[in-house]
Image (tube, grey):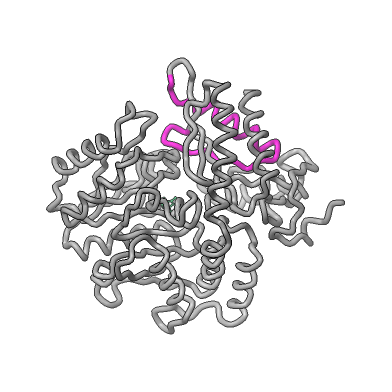
Amino acid sequence: MSVAPDTVLGGPTLPQERRLVTALPGPRTQELQARKAAAVSSGVGVTMPIYAAAAGGGVVVDVDGNSLIDLGSGIAVTTVGNADPAVAAAVADQAARFTHTCFMISGYEGYVEVAERLNRLTPGDHPKRTALFNSGAEAVENAIKIARIATKKQAVVAFDHAYHGRTNLTMGLTAKSMPYKSGFGPFAGEIYRAPMSYPYRDGGLSGAEAARAALLQIEKQVGANNLAAIIIEPIQGEGGFIVPALGFLPELAAWCKANDVVFIADEIQTGFARTGAMFACEHEGVVPDLITTAKGIAGGLPLAAVTGRADLMDAPHAGGLGGTYGGNPVACAAAVAALDAFEHGGLIERAQQIGEIALARLNAAKQADPRIGEVRGRGAMIAIEIVDPTTGDPDAQLTGAVAKAAHAQGVIVLTCGTYGNIIRLLPPLSIPDHLLTEGLDVLLDALARN
Ligand SMILES: *Cc1c(COP(=O)(O)O)cnc(C)c1O
């Protein structure tokens, strides 16, 4: 029985099934695509051939009544599940009380509550403070501002394959030119790039060896006495789900500590149970000086944070940090509900289970298909790197074709990577096993047919 999409509410009670009732895009999506082309900047792309009507559990239902398996979570955002009932209720309740005062004008408890929880949940038991913002890029910009004013130094090091956002400062930190930077310069100064540990493509350097190479370059080309901060994603997201060799992150963090350099972990994609730990830094016991979070923090509402050492966070002058909407009360209410689920809802264990299921299935496929060069990731952040089996070169064309074929069969998967040859899986942690397995089957079938 199909229900008119207009009347369908989202959340986990949506039928948990892949169901295609039209070819994709369906007729109502096609109408919206035409309106989009006439009304929306073509600089804003849409990956999937659907327009959403409802979502929850492990599915996104489109305006034509198609139900697709969600292996993307809107780029690692709906980690607790889309339209999660507790998040939706918290949003409705807060929206009915007040939607905005500007925290810098009239304070409210939700903002303070989110800060207290982030201070407690992030790695390390030292005194911490938090400031809230609207987007990941804004959090990264503010982390750099804080590091600069606290150290009285200016240079910042980011890594090959890094992604930190699309604003001017964060474009400078982001590595990949197309589509993020090309034509949008000039970029901010005093940003330097260091080599990343990328075991599949750096000849298998150990973490210590890769860290030594990066730190030698940093010492020679920048100098610790000029360097305010190193910023790094503990597992790189847009750059290709690159998991650095064990030891790389701890070596960098130790060097920063010894040299009065702020170690910033950008956990915007990896944070909040995604990798099978509350934060990815925890896998190696790394305690960052500052940590940036966003994406999964508020179950789909826009919110971001910088959390870290109180002495650094309190370095800016009063009024030096802020913004009109930063820490919006509705987003904070959503975050409190989502953080409850991360802490008490068994989501860390669920991410680990999802990782075990996906890694087993994908590693078995790799044995049979040498075009899968590597399977990697942690928890519910898993990727395959697609290569030409004879040369080992990245095969972006095949990667795109496989993703497109999976989309046509009703599975939302995303690609990424500097070379465009990574298929990444970021399912909501609310996905039931049968949809995860079916989604992997469809993906691997799409690979086999291409
Ligand atoms: C998405 C992302 C950002 C930027 O976040 P926005 O909310 O899109 O500005 C920054 N860093 C990482 C690691 C990300 O994945």
Q: Is residue 219 toward the left or the right of residue 115 in the image?
A: left
Residue 169 visible? The answer is no
Residue 206 colored in magenta in the image:
no
What residue sits 44% from the left and 38% below the top?
240
* Picture quarter with the C terminus: top right
Residue at x 54% of width, y 30% of height: 363
Vertical position of residue 164 compared to residue 111: above or below: above
Task: Judge whether 398 appears above or below 174 on screen.
Answer: above
The residue furthest bottom is 106
- Residue at (75%, 46%) from the top-left corner? 17
Is residue 39 among what the camera can see? Answer: yes
Q: Position of residue 254 (x, y in %)?
A: 23, 50
Residue 403 magenta-highlighted: yes
The residue sitting at 43% across, 32% down in the picture is: 419
Q: Position of residue 377 (x, y in %)?
A: 47, 40
In which quarter of the view is residue 238 placed? top left
Question: Which residue in the rendered view is the most extreme toward the top?
Answer: 390
Q: Could you say where residue 400 lies in the image, as x and y percent from the top left?
A: 56, 32
Figure check: 396 above or below 331: above
Numbered range of the magenta stretch:
392-420
User: How far across and how far down the image is residue 305, in percent?
Assistant: 41, 64
